[in-house]
């Protein structure tokens, strides 16, 4: 469990940094330096990859199934996240209506393909590094981050 919680925080913080660099402003609805959709996505990517690794021996088939399934799942998560943020907070953080193959406001086939490609990059290059960082995180840091994250969510719901 500690592994997945730390994976969530590492990738949420990296997602926050990435989005802040790309968008030149704070990323996400929370006050802290995390964008939870990246943390959730990284957990799902990891679980699906581990599952497929155990079930499918053919690497080409494994990567095709991984790419298709993760592209769809991450797009659904992005869509749900966009809808929830808009309904709860009245804010639109992203809008794909200008994409040629949009699926409403919060998803598009173009972005699905990007999420699939980013997931490959994550599994092939970043996951090993992140796993090395994760094992060095003391339990107390995991507990502190979890408490701060819960507090951040509560404050966000009260204030915004």
Image: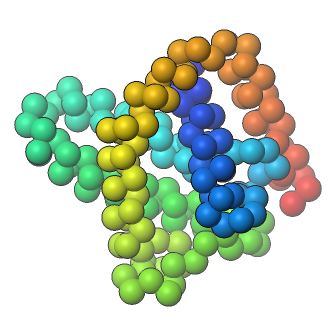
Q: Residue at x 49, y 56 (%)?
A: 77
Q: Position of residue 154 (x, y in %)?
A: 83, 44
Q: Residue at x 22, y 30 (%)?
A: 53
Picture layout, residue 25 above or below residue 129? below
Q: How is the image coloured?
A: rainbow
61 left or right, relative to 93: left
Q: Position of residue 27 (x, y in %)?
A: 70, 58
Q: Position of residue 103 (x, y in %)?
A: 42, 78
In-front residue for pair 69/67: 67
Q: Residue 130: tell me if it is visible.
A: yes
Which quarter of the figure has residue 32? top right
Q: Residue at x 42, y 33 (%)?
A: 127
Q: Residue 87: tell me if it is visible.
A: no
Picture layout, residue 3 above or below residue 41? above
Which quarter of the figure has residue 5? top right
Which quarter of the figure has residue 100? bottom left
Picture layout, residue 40 above or below residue 21? above
78 left or right, relative to 137: left
Extreme residue in the right direction: 159
Picture layout, residue 88 above or below residue 153? below
Q: Position of residue 81 (x, y in %)?
A: 59, 60
Q: Residue at x 47, y 24 (%)?
A: 131
- Total marks placed: 0
Figure quadrant of the C terminus: bottom right
């Amino acid at each position: 469990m500690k592994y997945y919680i730390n994976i969530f925080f590492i990738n949420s913080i990296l997602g926050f940094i990435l989005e802040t660099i790309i968008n030149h402003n704070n990323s996400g609805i929370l006050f802290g330096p995390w964008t939870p959709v990246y943390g959730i996505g990284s957990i799902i990517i990891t679980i699906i990859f581990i599952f497929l690794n155990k079930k499918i021996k053919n690497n080409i088939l494994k990567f095709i199934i991984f790419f298709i399934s993760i592209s769809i799942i991450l797009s659904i998560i992005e869509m749900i996240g966009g809808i929830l943020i808009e309904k709860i907070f009245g804010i639109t953080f992203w809008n794909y209506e200008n994409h040629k193959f949009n699926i409403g406001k919060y998803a598009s086939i173009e972005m699905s393909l990007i999420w699939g490609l980013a997931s490959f990059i994550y599994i092939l290059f970043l996951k090993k590094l992140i796993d090395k960082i994760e094992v060095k995180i003391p339990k107390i840091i995991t507990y502190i981050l979890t408490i701060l994250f819960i507090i951040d969510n509560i404050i966000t719901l009260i204030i915004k």
